[in-house]
Amino acid sequence: MRKLAYLLLLFLSFFTVQAQMMMNPAVWTTKIEKESDTEYTITWNGTVEEGWHLYSQYTADGGALPLTFEYNNLEGNYELVGSTTESKTVKKYNDIFEVDETFFEGPITLVQKVKVTNRDVSNIQVEMEYQVCEEMCISQSNLFVYDLKSLTAQEVKNFEEYEQGKTVVTSTETSKTQGAITKTESKGLFTIFFLSFLSGFAALLTPCVFPMIPMTVSFFTKQSKTRAKGIKNAVFYGVSIILIYVILGTVVTAIFGADSLNALSTNVYFNVIFFLLLIVFAASFLGAFEIMLPNSWANKVDSQADRGGLIGIIFMALALAIVSFSCTGPIVGTLLVEAASKGGIAPVVGMLGFSLALALPFMLFAMFPGWLNSMPKSGGWLNTVKVSLGFLELALAFKFLSNADLVLQAHWLEREVFLAIWIAIFGTWALYLFGKVRLPHDSPVESISVGRLFMALFVSIFTIYMIPGLWGAPLKIISGFPPPLTYAESPYGVGGKGGASAGEVAALPEGAKLGAHDIVAFTDYEKGLAYAKSVNKPILLDFTGFACVNCRKMEDYVWSDPTIMSILKNEIVLISLYVDDPTKLPEGEQYISETSGKKVKTIGNKWSDFQMKHYQANAQPYYIVLDTDESRLTEHVGYTPDIEEYKKWLKEGINKKK
């Protein structure tokens, strides 16, 4: 009886391990609804196991793979109406890939409207591809077929009948430039609010706005019969300012659409337009000209402000917005441009933060008029603030030009060139603050204030900090603004040669490349196996992914250990198979998987199917030490951050081979 129980326990344990190895953390249900004779709505509802992250269509390139949809026979049969809308997502910074990743939180709902253009088409076929990660990453795909006659939907498990000629459709253009764009500028709404709030205070310290504080507060205190009435009017005035700017943000969101705004960050034309727009704003702040709304607008609004009462106060707030536009306009424009590229209600949140900072001083000084005596007097320092904002606008402009260059992969604005531009901009700003550079509206500088000196020192330090970036320094403080280290004239830095000489690179075996830390790695299993046999060394089979966080952690923090690196370079043959490699296989090499029944179309599909077929696993990282006859020398391990434990595991396999 004990033996029977023991065998039963082993049997259950085996299937438990198999179930854990062949994981499916995301489960979907779907439906199709008919809206009219030609229009249909497809809805997907998904649940993801706790602790796992499934990534959005809009997650930043350079991190986890985005959710994508592939429609069969799209052209000529049906067309998509708008983009695929998503339920709630969250953004979180990933310090391994140095990007803000966007993933779903809670139950997932995706909705896509489709318009049929060919009445003879009988069904719609959609393949959904996505990645889910916890301590490991799993890339999955699901094929859904929707019958337009019966309005039924099913998930197809076998791709045998799956037709060719699909068109990849995503709500962004990331599929065209996989890994090319580092959209690290994407920020949460709180961050946008905070930065906009600071921008509002910066606008407050410009020559167009600051002098208006005592004038406006004096007006309320004189016109109001009681102090309480004055405070009430001042508060309403501040609320009116906030409403004006929030309405502006709402209009921008309504014009572009909450979903489509996100796509702007990867659109070449919009990024070039934003670049030119910010150059104009910077030139205005630097004193080349002033951006002003027509005087007739200000006169008409000002005349309405004389009406008195609450209506008059609203027009007073509008008059402030118009009169101060030459100073606030470039800041508001920049905020709207930046917030618009984030999507959703970001422009509204941005304008709320900006207007709140702008309105607060008017309200507070009206409540406590005595504070006016402690206010600094207007003077040249206001122009210094304005010019400083101009330098910041100029630096920010090149971020958008860099985005366009990354999308095109034109290599016109590589990392070194970008950093050189920023060093020149911030260096000139430092000289300006020290009084060594003068602009048209500046007075001669005989001495500088202590505050201006501290600011000059801060900008100088930042400028000097960026200089080593030309030689390959990571510059983590500004990570996400310059192009990534890989998008450079020399990935090893100016004048750098990396860890391998040209002769060593030329002597690499066929099918091998220099991987992490210049370790020789094969990316083709058969070629790596043949080489291992020729040198009679064991194999470290590494199932990995370009977008696998813990794979990069293993390479950065474990493989970089001198002992581990020595083992990988000298005692073992490394074969790294990327299960998310999007490179298409030649038509003749594509096949239907015996394991999953799905069509294997890419190199990543091929190695993922290889892992499932031979090792009954679909997660990465996944490591096995093999002998040259392909037999296992060790049990597999996954993410193993303990260096000593990983070294012991490697040595166990190598010693068995010996």
Image (cartoon, rainbow, N blue to C red):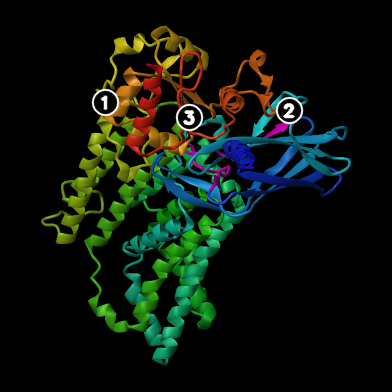
- Looking at the image, is 63 positioned above or below residue 357? above
Q: Position of residue 106 (x, y in %)?
A: 59, 55
Q: Can you tell which of label 3 and label 2 is closer to the viewer?
A: 3
Could you tell me if the residues under marks 1 and 3 are in contact, i.e. CB atoms within 8 Å? no
Q: Position of residue 16 (x, y in %)?
A: 60, 40
Could you tell me if the residues under marks 3 and 2 are in contact, i.e. CB atoms within 8 Å? no
The answer to whether residue 557 is visible is: no
Residue 205 lies left or right of residue 167; in this view the side is left
Q: Can you tell which of label 1 and label 3 is closer to the viewer?
A: 3
Please, what is the three-letter code of the amino acid marked with disc 2?
Answer: Phe
Residue 34 lies left or right of residue 131; in this view the side is right
Q: Nearer the viewer, residue 403 or 228?
A: 403
Image quadrant occupied by the N terminus: top right
Q: Nearer the viewer, residue 134 or 339?
A: 134
Could you tell me if the residues under marks 1 and 2 are in contact, i.e. CB atoms within 8 Å? no
Pick out the residue farthest to the left.
446
- Dot 1: what SS? loop
Please, what is the three-letter code of the amino acid marked with disc 3?
Answer: Glu
The residue that mark 1 highlights is 494
Compare marks 3 and 2 and give the one earlier in the sequence: 2
* Mark 3 → mark 2, Cα distance in angstroms: 32 Å
Compare marks 1 and 3 and give the one earlier in the sequence: 1
Q: Is disc 1 surrounded by few (<14), some (14 to 19) or many (20+) residues within 10 Å?
A: some
Task: Answer whether residue 64 is magenta in the image.
Answer: yes
Q: What span is in magenta?
A: 52-74
Q: Residue at x 11, y 57 (%)?
A: 447
Task: Answer whether residue 650 is magenta in the image.
Answer: no
Q: Residue at x 36, y 66 (%)?
A: 209
Please, what is the three-letter code of the amino acid marked with disc 1?
Answer: Val
- Give the dominant element type of the magenta stretch: helix, strand or loop: loop
Compare marks 1 and 2 and give the one earlier in the sequence: 2
The residue that mark 3 highlights is 635
